[in-house]
Image: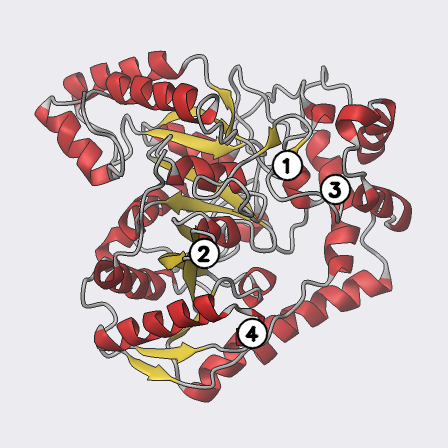
């Protein structure tokens, strides 16, 4: 049988072209791994639902390849997407909630439509922290009432972090080629960092949010999750661009290159000025600090000039922005769903959970109650308006822009996550740098830049990844 573990998109296309592998074969192989690893054996529980038409789609892509050639580098490639991304097929879009378990959506999210257009095989939906971790402050990362608990592939007791946990774990465990996650406040970067993969959070407005179960317009985005920087760049190519349904994408002319893979330069760090952010080193363990310092040294060995004291402490996301926007955004999204969907407002979801407490309220729903009771849904509250503008200023003008301007750095790096990135809407990409021996958990380094600096970040991350080579597949 063809060895699919750690296979890249380029490797898949080479195998397709040589006839060693077909899309049908690869799709079937991933399905078998899901049966053996995700639903039995270590039981990672990262895949919530499989597409019953996946094998048929793969077969069609194989035939199309023979007749017309491939549509794109993703032609025939099996991809898993997060369960908050609409697909107009026989799969649900529930955001992990039993209250939305009957949500068979009448339209594709733009991200899903772009993947289909590229010839990708949407293999299934990944489990996630329920409602993108915006239901209860006590909810465990990776838990949903519909899907249960996602388990780390490296340590059953390890924290999977963020809400895109299923996408991260499935990608790390080789249950798919690549996956799509979503982020509001770290939910692409954190789970990628904690599961030993590459996560790319794009500049807000680069990727459409249309058809994705929302938290807020201020910070939501979708992005690639992969095992290599090259695969993340390839996946990014397929999902970026203008969408009439999403105003954040409307003014991006000249800001999207033709091919992000053009920036995969092994010498990409040579001559680059990289700021070192130790703004929250005090929160790291000694093992994590050691991994970070070794990573900084590798950056220097790649030919970059590192600049010390480019420090930006944690910028805690102002929860009022999310709180006020959530009620408005979730009600607007639910209004676009099929008339057969029973729960069509935030209040309906709350009432449904109250009627099914054993399943729906394991961790409570305090955040949902706050959003329903405290937010008007009109976004006219003075606190919301002031806080949203203040958050942008703190993370941009007084945050990322300030430290990059003040140090003359092109980008900066931070161990773990830089929360200024999701608040500002600026891009970031995390790359594995090693494992902590005490608990065998992965650790990552996040590269952060200005708006639409994905080309620079990809150059830097690819160059670093090629030298560091810290990614290690989990063993089962």
Residue at 74% in and 58% down: 319
Q: Nearer the viewer, mark 3 or mark 4?
A: 4
As measured in the structure, the alpha-carbon distance from the residue carrying label 3 to the one carrying label 4 is 27 Å
Which element type, helix, strand or loop, lies under badge 2? loop
Mark 1 touches mark 3? (CB < 8 Å): no
Which element type, helix, strand or loop, lies under badge 4? loop
Q: N-terminal of the two: label 3 or label 4?
A: 3
Q: N-terminal of the two: label 1 or label 4?
A: 1
Q: Nearer the viewer, residue 248 or 49?
A: 49
Query: Residue 88: image x %, image y %?
Result: 53, 21
Tell me the quarter of the image containing the C terminus: top left
Q: Nearer the viewer, mark 4 or mark 2?
A: 4
As measured in the structure, the alpha-carbon distance from the residue carrying label 3 to the one carrying label 2 is 33 Å
Q: Is residue 311 above or below residue 65?
A: below
Of the numbered discs in the image, which one, if any, rests on residue 252? 2
Q: Is residue 183 left or right of residue 74?
A: right
Q: Nearer the viewer, mark 1 or mark 2?
A: 1
Q: Which class describes the residues within 10 Å of circle 4: few (<14), some (14-19), or many (20+)?
A: some
Q: Label 4, on which residue?
A: 280
Tell me the quarter of the image containing the N terminus: top left
As measured in the structure, the alpha-carbon distance from the residue carrying label 1 to the one carrying label 2 is 36 Å
Q: N-terminal of the two: label 4 or label 2?
A: 2
Q: Which class describes the residues within 10 Å of circle 2: few (<14), some (14-19), or many (20+)?
A: few
Q: Quadrant of residue 171?
A: top left
As measured in the structure, the alpha-carbon distance from the residue carrying label 4 to the one carrying label 2 is 33 Å
Q: Is residue 115 above or below residue 196?
A: above
Q: Is residue 457 above or below residue 14?
A: below
């Amino acid at each position: 049988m063809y060895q699919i573990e750690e296979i890249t998109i380029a490797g898949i296309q080479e195998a397709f072209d040589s006839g060693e592998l077909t899309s049908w074969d690869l799709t079937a192989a991933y399905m078998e791994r899901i049966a053996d690893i995700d639903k039995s054996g270590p039981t990672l529980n990262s895949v919530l639902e499989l597409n019953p038409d996946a094998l048929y789609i793969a077969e069609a892509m194989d035939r199309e390849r023979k007749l017309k050639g491939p549509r794109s580098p993703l032609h025939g490639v099996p991809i898993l997407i997060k369960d908050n991304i609409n697909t107009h097929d026989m799969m649900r879009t529930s955001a992990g909630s039993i209250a939305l378990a009957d949500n068979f959506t009448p339209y594709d999210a733009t991200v899903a439509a772009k993947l289909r257009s590229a010839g990708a095989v949407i293999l299934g939906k990944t489990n996630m922290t329920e409602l993108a971790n915006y239901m209860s402050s006590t909810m465990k990362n990776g838990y949903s009432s519909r899907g249960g608990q996602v388990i780390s592939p490296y340590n059953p007791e390890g924290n999977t972090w963020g809400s895109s946990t299923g996408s991260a774990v499935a990608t790390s465990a080789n249950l798919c080629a690549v996956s799509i996650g979503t982020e509001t406040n770290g939910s692409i970067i954190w789970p990628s960092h904690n599961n030993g993969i590459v996560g790319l959070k794009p500049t807000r407005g680069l990727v459409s949010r249309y058809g994705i179960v929302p938290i807020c317009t201020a910070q939501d985005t979708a992005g690639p999750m992969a095992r290599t920087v090259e695969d993340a760049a390839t996946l990014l190519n397929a999902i970026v661009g203008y969408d009439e349904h999403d105003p954040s994408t409307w003014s991006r002319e000249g800001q999207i290159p033709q091919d992000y893979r053009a920036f995969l330069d092994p010498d990409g760090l040579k001559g680059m000025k990289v700021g070192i952010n130790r703004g929250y080193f005090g929160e790291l363990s000694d093992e994590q600090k050691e991994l970070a310092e070794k990573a900084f040294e590798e950056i220097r060995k790649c030919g970059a000039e590192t600049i010390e004291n480019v420090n930006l402490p944690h910028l805690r996301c102002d929860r009022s922005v999310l709180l006020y926007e959530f009620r408005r955004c979730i009600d607007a999204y639910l209004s676009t769903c099929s008339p057969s969907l029973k729960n069509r407002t935030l209040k309906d979801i709350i009432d449904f959970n109250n009627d099914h407490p054993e399943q729906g309220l394991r961790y409570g729903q305090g955040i949902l109650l706050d959003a329903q009771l405290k937010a008007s849904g009109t976004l006219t509250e003075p606190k919301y308006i002031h806080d949203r503008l203040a958050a942008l200023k703190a993370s941009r003008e007084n945050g990322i822009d300030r430290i990059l301007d003040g140090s003359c750095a092109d980008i900066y790096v931070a161990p773990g996550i830089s929360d200024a990135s999701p608040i500002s809407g600026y891009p970031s990409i995390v790359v594995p740098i090693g494992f902590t021996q005490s608990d065998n958990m992965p650790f990552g380094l996040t590269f952060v830049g200005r708006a639409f600096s994905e080309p620079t970040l990809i150059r830097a991350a690819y160059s670093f990844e090629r030298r560091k080579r810290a990614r290690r597949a989990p063993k089962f």
